[in-house]
Amino acid sequence: MRKYIDCREVPSESGCTVAISADNETELLEAAVQHAVAVHHHPDTPELRTMIKQAIREGAPAA
């Protein structure tokens, strides 16, 4: 089943509306970490990766 993460579900000052999806969790995690580092200026830490893993959902993000 396809997996996704949606920035709209995470409170932020930027009001980011990006949603990322992939067929597997590893690919999705790497894309989401790259987004968090490049756009939201988070350091790539084990804590960030854990937080992102917890936000991964199955299916597709809402329109």
Image (cartoon, rainbow, N blue to C red):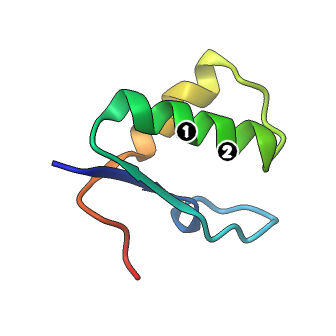
Say above or below: 30 vs 9: above
Image x and y of residue 36, in percent: 69, 42
Q: Residue furthest left?
A: 1
Q: x, y percentage for residue 7?
A: 58, 60
Residue 14 falls left or right of residue 20: right
Q: Which residue is mark 2?
A: 35
Residue 21 shows which numbered tag? none
- The answer to whether the residue labelled 1 contacts the one labelled 2, judged by CB atoms less than 8 Å apart, is yes
Q: Seen from this angle, which residue lies furthest top?
A: 46
Q: Could you say which quadrant of the image residue 32 lies in?
A: top right
Q: Mark 1 sits on what residue?
A: 31
Answer above or below: position of 9 versus 56: below
Helix, strand or loop status at disc 1: helix
| Distance in Å between CA atoms under marks 1 and 2 | 6 Å
Q: Nearer the viewer, residue 59 or 11?
A: 59
Asked if 60 appears above or below 34 in the picture, the reply is below
Mark 1 residue crowding within 10 angstroms, few (<14) / some (14–19) / many (20+): some
* Relative to 6, 25 lies left or right: left
At 79% from the left and 42% from the top, the residue drawn is: 38
Residue 46 screen position, x and y as percent: 60, 17
Q: Residue at x 47, y 33 (%)?
A: 29
- In the rendered structure, which amino acid carries the disc numbered 2? His
Camera-side residue: 47 or 25? 25
Q: Secondary structure at mark 2?
A: helix
Q: Residues within 10 Å of mark 2 (few under 14, many from 20)?
A: some
Q: In the figure, residue 35 lies in which quadrant?
A: top right
Residue type (three-letter) at the residue carrying disc 1: Ala
Number of marks in the rendered image: 2
Placement of the C terminus among the 4 image quadrants: bottom left
Q: Position of residue 17 (x, y in %)?
A: 62, 71
Horizontal placement of 36 versus 51: left or right?
right
Residue at image position (78%, 36%) is 42
